[in-house]
Amino acid sequence: MTVVKTEVQSIALTVKHIALHRVRVPLKEPFRISNGSIDEKDSILIEITTDKGVTGWGEASPMTGSFYSNDTPEGAWRALREQLIPLALEEKRINAPRFFERLREVPGEAFAKAGLEGALWDAYARSLGAPLHELFGASSKPIPSGVAIGIYDTVDELIERVGRYVGEG
């Protein structure tokens, strides 16, 4: 099924329930930058259930302790609970473009808003029985990705780590 832009503009969902799940995923090795080090990724999974039983998932994943932005997992959780989820649930039917404009009116909390938006897009795609990439007019080809390399104690350690990642592809 190919979804066209006009269909995306007219999609509306009735959201019955939104659940938040806090997860902590251990990293393979600590990640260190100038203002701190972490050894686990603290994320919030957002689960949206529609009136038709369709479930959509999103992730809000700011780093712990204002690692590289002012957003934190605690702040994202609070924003979702106190502002964003009530905003979504007060809508009778959520139309994607209009609702995302309303999200932009809420100051800050970019990670929380992105997670909720991701869950809604996932629910929209699943309700249409189409892959999410089709809603965006993208291909299903793999997308090359990189790796973030933190600070190491010595240049030799850094070179070794870069070499290992290059070797892994």
Image: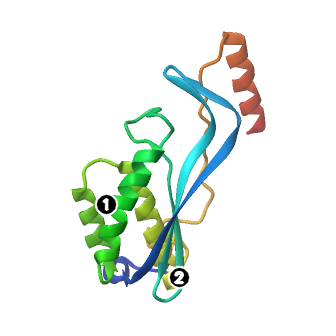
Q: Which residue is mark 1?
A: 83
- Secondary structure under the numbered disc 1 in the rendered image: helix
Q: State the scheme by which the image is colored.
A: rainbow
Left or right: residue 76 versus residue 142 is left
Q: Is residue 137 visible?
A: no
Give the residue type that dot 2 points to. Val
Q: Position of residue 1 (x, y in %)?
A: 53, 84
Residue shown at the point (64%, 39%) measured from the top left:
40
Residue shown at the point (78%, 33%) measured from the top left:
167
Q: Is residue 2 above or below residue 104?
A: below
Q: Position of residue 124 (x, y in %)?
A: 45, 77
Q: Nearer the viewer, residue 100 or 64?
A: 64
Left or right: residue 158 versus residue 132 is right
Q: Nearer the viewer, mark 2 or mark 1?
A: 1
Q: Nearer the viewer, residue 47 or 148?
A: 47
Q: Is residue 3 visible?
A: yes
Q: Which residue is mark 2?
A: 54
Left or right: residue 60 versus residue 163 is left
- Numbered circles on residues, count: 2
Q: Pointer 1: residues within 10 angstroms few (<14), some, or many (20+)?
A: few
